[in-house]
């Protein structure tokens, strides 16, 4: 599965639905094999199934990130909580048997699936904080998580079971449970801060988490009389009740963030969705009449930009830097006036604010300007089109960073000449 996902990254294919169907098919085949061939149909294997569904959720997120070439739409804080939850649970389940399924799947499959999930989460965190940090939407991912971690550790120390008969590892396992309960909150908050728009893949991810928590809750309900602890009040078994918290808390969180009607959520965000990872690239209807010529021109235009490389524009960047130095601005105000009239081809442009949160922090060299857009090429050789309307940009000039209002550059274009006249010549690499 991991090899297939890295192959996606290399091939840069634009038809991810097949990959997602393959992920679901592999999961179903693996689940069937584990249930019948490893667990021999034992009921306790439902806990392993829950972990496999959770792993599938992170597989979907990973494929989404690789296909998009970014981490837009993902909450790194949610992933960090998941990673910490996995670490806490694995500290117990890799060598102690207290919280494992009693069937054969608890011997190695359960732990292997959790380790695989942890690796996927760490990979996504690396992309968010290192390799693709430019696409991480930090402003939307603003829910504080430190209080959640502290509260989880405190409650775990107070309410843990004693299935391992080792207080430290019993506490860590319970802390992992509490952390997994709250881990979805930053992702839901991120969606809320981004305008409440849920991409189909994110919808599938949340749905898989809900299924995983539901299966885990079913198992814990049936095993509630087998879970032991040191009661805090009388003979009340607080640990068994805490283990039923996962599905209840997730449903409460979904309801709080507007997903109380699960059937409606399924209809809006999952059913009939083919997991197209870039909503701006939905397939158009077959061209007819004049539209056929337009579509053909657009296809040729995309092909024109396809094979460009960031390094090829180094001379243009140097030329733009010399161009600004030759204008000799005396101060920031004068530099701002110059930039308001200057040609920006070759400048390093960064998106500071945008209507589409996925564009925030995009940085690259300007290679084309139209009335309504800038076209840039990023350091990883991706060509992006940035709308000027409702956007604020930052440009580096003479060691200083200045903000440019996108709408003013639309107006500047219209002032270059009467309607129908050609725009002035722009720099060219020819």
Image (spheres, helix red, strand yellow):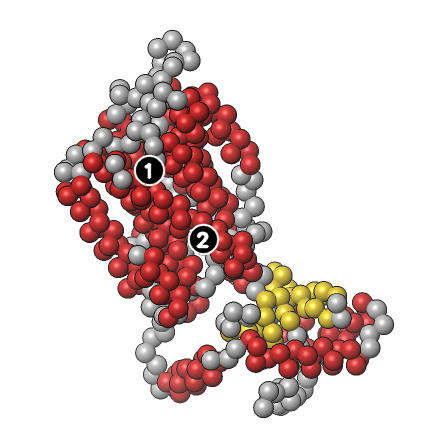
Are dots 1 and 2 in contact, CB under 8 Å? no
On screen, residue 420 above or below 171: below
Residue 213 shows which numbered tag?
Answer: 1
Pointer 1 or 2: first along the chain:
2
Q: Is residue 403 left or right of residue 357?
A: right
Q: Position of residue 324 (x, y in %)?
A: 75, 78
The residue located at (58%, 91%) in the rendering is 430
The residue located at (57%, 77%) in the rendering is 311
Q: Residue 203: in sight, yes or no?
A: no
Of discs 1 and 2, which sits in the foreground?
2
On screen, residue 335 above or below 245: below
Residue furthest toward the top?
A: 234
Count of numbered circles on the image: 2
Looking at the rendered structure, the secondary structure element under dot 2 is helix
- Which of 64 and 206 lies nearest the eye of the viewer? 64
Residue that badge 2 annotates: 124
Residue 337 shows which numbered tag?
Answer: none
Looking at the rendered structure, the secondary structure element under dot 1 is helix
The residue located at (56%, 60%) in the rendering is 134
Q: Residue 8: in sight, yes or no?
A: yes
User: Splitting the image into 4 quarters, where does residue 372 fall?
Assistant: bottom right
- Which of 360 and 112 lies nearest the eye of the viewer? 112
Q: Position of residue 379 (x, y in %)?
A: 55, 70
Q: Residues within 10 Å of mark 1 (few under 14, many from 20)?
A: many
The residue located at (68%, 79%) in the rendering is 318
Q: Position of residue 192 (x, y in %)?
A: 49, 48
């Amino acid at each position: 599965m991991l090899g297939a996902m890295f192959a996606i990254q290399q091939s840069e294919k634009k038809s991810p639905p097949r990959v997602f169907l393959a992920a679901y098919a592999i999961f179903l085949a693996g689940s069937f094999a584990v249930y019948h061939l490893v667990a021999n149909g034992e009921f306790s294997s439902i806990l392993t199934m829950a972990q496999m569904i959770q792993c599938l959720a992170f597989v979907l997120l990973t494929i989404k990130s690789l296909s998009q070439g970014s981490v837009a739409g993902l909450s790194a804080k949610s992933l960090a909580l998941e990673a910490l939850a996995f670490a806490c649970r694995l500290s117990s389940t890799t060598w102690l048997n207290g919280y494992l399924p009693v069937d054969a799947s608890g011997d190695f499959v359960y732990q292997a699936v959790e380790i695989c999930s942890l690796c996927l989460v760490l990979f996504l965190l690396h992309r968010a904080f290192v390799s693709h940090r430019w696409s991480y939407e930090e402003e939307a991912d603003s829910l504080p998580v430190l209080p959640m971690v502290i509260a989880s550790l405190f409650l775990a120390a107070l309410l843990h079971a004693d299935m391992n008969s080792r207080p430290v590892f019993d506490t860590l396992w319970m802390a992992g449970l509490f952390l997994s309960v709250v881990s979805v909150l930053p992702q839901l908050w991120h969606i809320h801060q981004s305008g409440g728009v849920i991409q189909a893949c994110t919808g599938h991810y949340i749905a898989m988490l809900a299924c995983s928590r539901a299966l885990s809750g079913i198992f814990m309900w049936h095993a509630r009389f087998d879970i032991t602890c040191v009661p805090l009040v009388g003979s009340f078994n607080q640990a068994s009740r805490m283990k039923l918290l996962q599905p209840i808390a997730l449903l409460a969180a979904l309801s709080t963030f507007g997903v109380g009607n699960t059937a409606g959520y399924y209809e809006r965000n999952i059913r009939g969705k083919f997991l197209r990872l870039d909503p701006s690239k939905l397939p158009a209807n077959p061209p007819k009449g004049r539209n056929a010529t337009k579509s053909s021109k657009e296809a040729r235009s995309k092909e024109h930009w396809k094979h460009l490389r960031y390094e090829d524009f180094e001379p243009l960047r140097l030329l733009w830097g010399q161009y600004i130095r030759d204008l000799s601005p005396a101060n920031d105000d004068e530099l701002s006036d110059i930039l308001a009239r200057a040609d920006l081809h070759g400048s390093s442009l960064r998106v500071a604010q945008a209507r589409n949160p996925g564009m925030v922090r995009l940085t690259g060299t300007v290679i084309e300007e139209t009335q309504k857009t800038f076209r840039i090429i990023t350091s990883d050789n991706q060509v992006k089109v940035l709308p000027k309307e409702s956007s604020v940009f930052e440009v580096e000039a003479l060691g200083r960073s200045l903000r440019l209002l996108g709408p003013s550059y639309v107006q500047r274009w219209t002032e270059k000449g009467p309607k129908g006249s050609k725009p002035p010549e722009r720099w060219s690499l020819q």
